[in-house]
Image: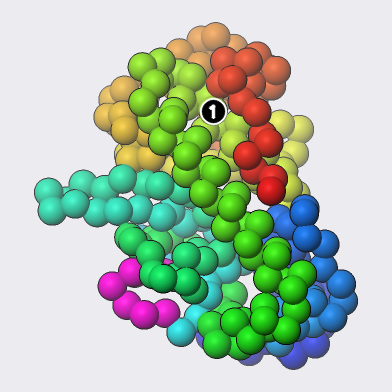
Amino acid sequence: MLPVPGCFRDFEERYPLSLDALITRVRGAPLASADRDALASTVMGIKTYGRGETIFDSDKCPSHLHVMTDGWAARSISFKDGSRQITDFLVVGDPCDLSALGHGSVGRVTALTSASITLLNRSALAAATMAHPRLASAFLNIALIEQSTLRIWLAYMGRHDKATHLAHLFCELHARLRRVELVGDHSFDLPLTHEVIADATGMSGVHVNRVLQQLRRDGLIRLHRHHLEILQPQRLRDLAEFDPAYLFA
């Protein structure tokens, strides 16, 4: 684990995509410098995980809040037959286990790539949100966005048109990654295997491949070596019926 300076300015210069990306997620509750300093004071360090490692498990009581600093992860629920349902993808700036700060959560968070995680002390964060209402409001906004995102995922899970479902997932990821400046010219890294996409959409791996081929044939996307390029953004949004309002509290 790497130590983190206590001063937010020093921390921001050393790790520009961690807490700064978390703050970027907050649109409805802008933070003053005192709020940012209070948030930075809760940082305990940086921890790295390898692909496939468990970052958070609801069976264990967390002493930290985990915030994505680099890489990709997934929230999921596992079943006795060995299958799993992915309920969200996590990228830079996303808290991995925000619900665990309340009355507990269900499932686990697994690294999909090598990942770096900023650890925030749970007790210190609770005290900081009590002392700084804007900070508390910021985390509430993020929790509301997570709930809205889950409802949208559930709605699209029931759609018969899987091309629409996959198009919506790509539009959502594009919007989220653009917010943290990880998109260029409508393209971004997408380190997700067909199996992972299947676990998130309720399709089989074979079905995912067929839908990807359909989107390619229609001239909507280009996917090569885990890099996705959206060739016709408006057409993809129209197919997906994508409205990004749910991503902003």
Q: Residues within 10 Å of mark 1 (few under 14, many from 20)?
A: many
Is 37 situated above or below 184? Answer: below
From the image, tell me which residue sits under label 1.
168
Whole-percent x, y for residue 162 in the image: 40, 20
Residue 205, percent from left and from top: 30, 31
Residue 212, percent from left and from top: 45, 22
Within the magenta stretch, is there residue 207?
Answer: no
Find the residue positioned furthest to the left. 81
- By secondary structure, the bulk of the magenta-drawn segment is best described as loop
Whether 236 is drawn above or below 187: the answer is above
**Number of dots carrying numbers:** 1
Q: Residue at x 70, y 65 (%)?
A: 137
Q: Which amino acid type is marked by label 1?
A: His
202 displayed left or right of 211: left
Q: Inspect this view and state whether residue 16 appears.
A: no
Start-end of magenta stretch: 55-62
